[in-house]
Amino acid sequence: LRPSSICADCSAADPTWASINRGVLICDECCSVHRSLGRHVSQVRSIRRGQWSPTQHAMLYQLANHGANNIWEHQLKDPSQNKHGRKKPASKDPLHPNKADFIRAKYQFLSFVNKQKESDVNSIDDVSKELHSSVRTNNVETCLRLLSKGADPNYFHKEKGNCPLHVAAQAGQVAQVELLVVYGADPGALDVNNKSPIDYARIGGFSDIADRLIECQYELTDRLAFHVCGRKPDHRNGQNFIIPEIGDNSTSDLSELDKQAKKKLQALTNHLFEELAMDVYDEVDRRENDKIWLETQDHSAVSDRTTVPFLPVNPDLSTTRNQGRQKLARFNKREFTTLIIDILNDARRRQTGFTSPVNTPKEHSKLFLLTSDRLHSLGAFSDEEPLYDSVASDEDYSSIDTHSVQSMRSMNSEAIEGPVSTDEYMEVKKALAGAETTIKTLVHKKTDLEQKVHIMQSTDGNVPNGFTADENDEISQGGIPSVMMDSVSSTHSMPGGAVGVPVDLPEPEEVVKKTEKITKRIQDLLKRAQEGDIKSYNPCSDRIFMAVTEMEALFPRNIPKEEVFHSLQLLKDSANRLRIECQHLASDSKQSTTQVIQCAYDVAKAAKQLVTL
Ligand SMILES: [Zn+2]
């Protein structure tokens, strides 16, 4: 059996989807999990119905058939690294939790990649240099492995004076060119001789590669145009943009709102404009994959858990940006088309408007690239970043209270939208009035409940468990060790318990309180890590896990808000991973500490995300 004839995750026959950046083919079911993780983890495309360039398609099959999957499952195949006997799910196993958990561990947390010492001592500089020299060969799996270790696709080799893409283009290695571009390599980057990879492809006599690289430079705007009108610009004949028009003639009659939106778009800095364009690109990708998904599935297979109703949270982006990305799903077709056309117009204006000599060609071609920082999470297990510092010194984590969360929020939205307009003010005022009504209703309900409890107490003396939680909390402040408290307070949150299971989203103050608890315990762990007290990692991580369980207990089983569901899931996953990491500490204490700190950092990040939603 060729690897490309079975699903890389569950071995089901005849996979119909591909994960381009992972170089694997996957079945429909597994694809639904890949999609729910977001493009920063897995870039999926339908094998038969997606838009492929022939060379990209060939690159994918070369990777799939030459064992790219072994990169992501290395530990499962190496007995010395698979002490816990973990194995992959079979096609008959249920999607949730078996396949979904496995896929998350495999691609989101890179739990099974080779983490042997030999590979860990390599710095990003070393693996990037290795990538720089490997791209002149046709061994594309080796390069994917190096990229999986965090090699920089735009690494500038000081001695050689160029980047990997220059080398691959000049050597005519078309599959390497395709792979590097998927990972964010810049076709317009200049080497010491002021030449781009496109120039070197032409010098080497590979005009097909040069043409393809020009296409890649315009991938973002081309995809947006194609989504609206089904055509792409003819770059070979110097046409770099198509600006589609809306069928009805209403564009000439712009509403005041449309004009304002256009002005706002034009006022964005290049950086913010680029971010917005990339978010819209991701949304186009989501919508197109969703369409294919719905057209190819039995209706019985389409459920809440297999569709992706809006862009999944990317923890590397700010909460505000994640919220903005998710709002794109609310645009109806006409609104979304209008937004795309505005972006295409402004992209052309920005590119052709760049005539001032301070803007080098390199900067201006970068504007339309899918930059590599979207794949940042691939380097997650590198120890280059001062992770410890970023947690310990980050005020976001040390003193989270409702006030600071609110001011963080308003700062974020101000940074993006500028001064508050009358409309926005009215909207806030309306929201406040709504909140006031809700509070009044809640106070009313509370009084009602108190009366009921009072009646029950006076008739029976026995009060159901759920109502005693507050009293327990008071006792805990009186000096009972908090470890004992955990076992007491978690009893009312056991899954399946009929009493005390919440039905509504919790009050923000409650979430903040639990976040503080989690944060305090993370700080405790980090303090121990600083002292090199490895023995205490395990109990510390257990305490963090318990705090996360308490947080989870605040939420109803069926969370009505999708982004809250995802954030909570991320928090649980991170805490679980931290606990597992602490239970299986490697003999090399420095390496274990790095791993543990990374995991703790993920928990903190997830908690922060939840509290700001
Ligand atoms: Zn599968």
Image: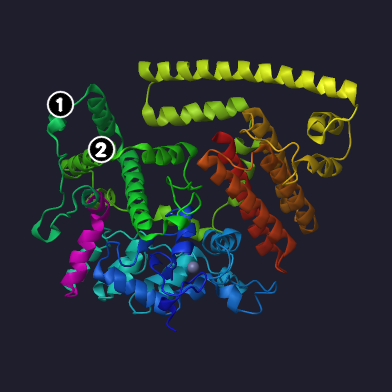
**Tags 2 and 1 in contact by the CB under 8 Å rule?**
no
Quarter assignment of residue 463 = top right
Nearest the viewer among 417 and 492 is 492
Q: CA distance from mark 2 to mark 1?
A: 15 Å
Quarter of the image containing the C terminus?
top right
Secondary element under disc 2, as helix, strand or loop, is helix
- Check if residue 212 falls in the magenta segment: yes
Quarter assignment of residue 483 = top right
Q: Dot 1 surroundings within 10 Å: few (below 14), some, or many (20 or more)?
A: few
Q: Residue at x 68, y 62 (%)?
A: 592
Kind of residue at disc 2: Arg
Instruction: Answer with mark 2 or mark 1, whichever residue precedes in sequence.
Output: 1
Position of 601 relative to 501 (above/below): below
View extreme (right): residue = 461
Q: Which residue is mark 2?
A: 334
Is any atom of residue 154 visible in this view? no
Residues drawn in magenta: 204-224
Residue 441 relative to residue 299: left or right = right
Kind of residue at disc 1: Asp
Residue 503 relative to residue 113: left or right = right
Q: Which residue is mark 1?
A: 253
Q: Dot 2 surroundings within 10 Å: few (below 14), some, or many (20 or more)?
A: few
Tell me the mark number nearer the camera, choosing from 2 and 1: 2
Q: Which SS type dominates the magenta stretch?
A: helix
Nearest the viewer among 590 and 317 is 317
- Residue 494, position in %: x, y? 75, 45
Figure label count: 2
